[in-house]
Amino acid sequence: MAKYLAQIILAGTQVIGKAFVRAVKQEYAASQQAAKNAGGGRHGARKAAADSVSGMTLQEAKQVLNLSDITDTQTLLKNYEHLFEVNDKSKGGSLYIQSKVVRAKERIDMELANLQKTQAEKARRSADGPHS
């Protein structure tokens, strides 16, 4: 009986292990494709990571906050504060929509930080001169 139980456990472990490896490979391929779709390079990788972390694409975040230019921080804050306030649960709003508003602002904040990093890297490279 113990022999059969050990065989069942071993077979189950192998199946789960193979499924896990396959899932990791698929996730890696998906993240590579997302980085490529985001423009490739370091900026594309950062953009894909931000999409993954926030669970929201930049385009969706712009739609939620009704923005066309993410660098317009005045409109960003005005729209964020308004949407957050009107969706306050204590005022009869929707906690779900309010959380979407928060996630959208977080996603845009990530994108702005990524843009700053990319610009800083470009400035550093151009200051270093052409070293290849």
Image: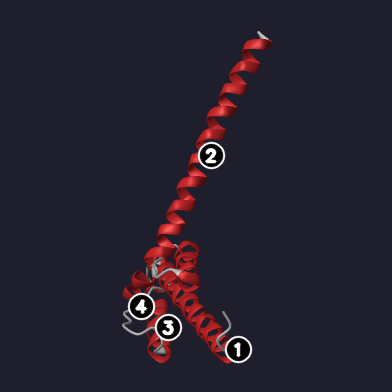
Q: Nearer the viewer, mark 4 or mark 1?
A: 1
Marks 4 and 1: CB-CB under 8 Å?
Answer: no
Q: Nearer the viewer, residue 4 or 82?
A: 4
Which residue is under mark 4? 65
Chain-order first, disc 4 or disc 1: 4
Q: Quadrant of the C terminus?
A: bottom right
Q: Is residue 60 left or right of residue 119?
A: left
Pinpoint residue 63: horizontal percent, then vertical percent. Answer: 31, 74
Are circles 2 and 1 on residues that touch, CB within 8 Å?
no
Q: Residue at x 49, y 46 (%)?
A: 25
C-alpha span from label 4 to label 3: 10 Å
Q: Quadrant of the N terminus?
A: top right
Tell which circle, 4 or 3, labels the residue nearer the N-terminal end: 4
Measuring 39% from the left and 83% from the top, which residue is drawn there?
Answer: 70
Residue at the spot of label 1: 128
- The label number, if any, that marks residue 20 in the structure image: 2
User: Residue, x 31% and y 79% (percent of image)?
Assistant: 66
Give the amino acid at mark 2: Phe
- Vertical arrangement, residue 61 with respect to residue 52, above or below: below
- Between the residue at mark 2 and the residue at mark 1, the CA separation in whole angstroms equals 44 Å
Q: Is residue 114 left or right of residue 95?
A: right
Q: Disc 4 residue type?
A: Leu
Mark nearer the viewer, 2 or 4: 2
Image color mode: secondary structure
Mark 3 residue element = helix
* Farthest-out residue, top: 1
